[in-house]
Amino acid sequence: MEAVVSQLTFPQSAEFNATNFTNYTVNGQVVGQFKTAGRFSFLEVFDAGHEVPAYQPAAALQAFNQTMNQEALHST
């Protein structure tokens, strides 16, 4: 999936492609990795299939809440 995302063209695509992944944590536990440029983020949640809320509900809820609150993805 990262290969597909890296081919997107948007104003911050060069910055996005140059950015390294950062651990995404929920209450200090690493549950995935992400990177952000501008208002575009890519999040990979570990140990989850295509239904992230079924496998990693806390990670899904945190990412959902951050997105709905118009916040950049960030670890907690």
Image (cartoon, grey):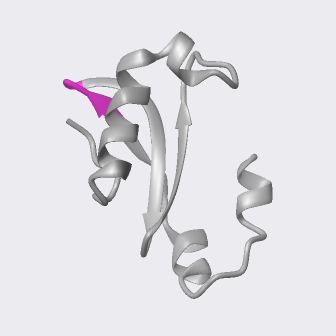
Residue 20 coordinates in the image, percent (x, y): 49, 59
Q: What is the count of numbered marks?
A: 0
Q: Main secondary structure of the magenta part?
A: strand
Residue 11 coordinates in the image, percent (x, y): 57, 88
Q: Is residue 46 above or below residue 71?
A: above
Front-most of residues 71 and 34:
71
Residue 35 coordinates in the image, percent (x, y): 47, 56
Query: From the image, which quarter does the C terminus lie in?
Result: top left
Res. 24 image quadrant: top left
Q: Is residue 48 magenta?
A: no
The single residue placed furthest to the front in the displayed view is 68
The single residue placed furthest to the bottom in the displayed view is 11
Front-most of residues 62 and 3:
62
Q: Is residue 44 left or right of residue 56?
A: right
Q: Residue at x 54, y 11 (%)?
A: 55
The single residue placed furthest to the top in the displayed view is 55
Q: Is residue 27 magenta?
A: yes
Q: Residue at x 35, y 20 (%)?
A: 58
Q: Is residue 8 above or below residue 53?
A: below
Q: Is residue 54 above or below residue 64?
A: above
Image: magenta residue range = 24-28
Res. 3 image quadrant: bottom right
Residue 52 coordinates in the image, percent (x, y): 56, 23
Front-most of residues 65 and 21:
65
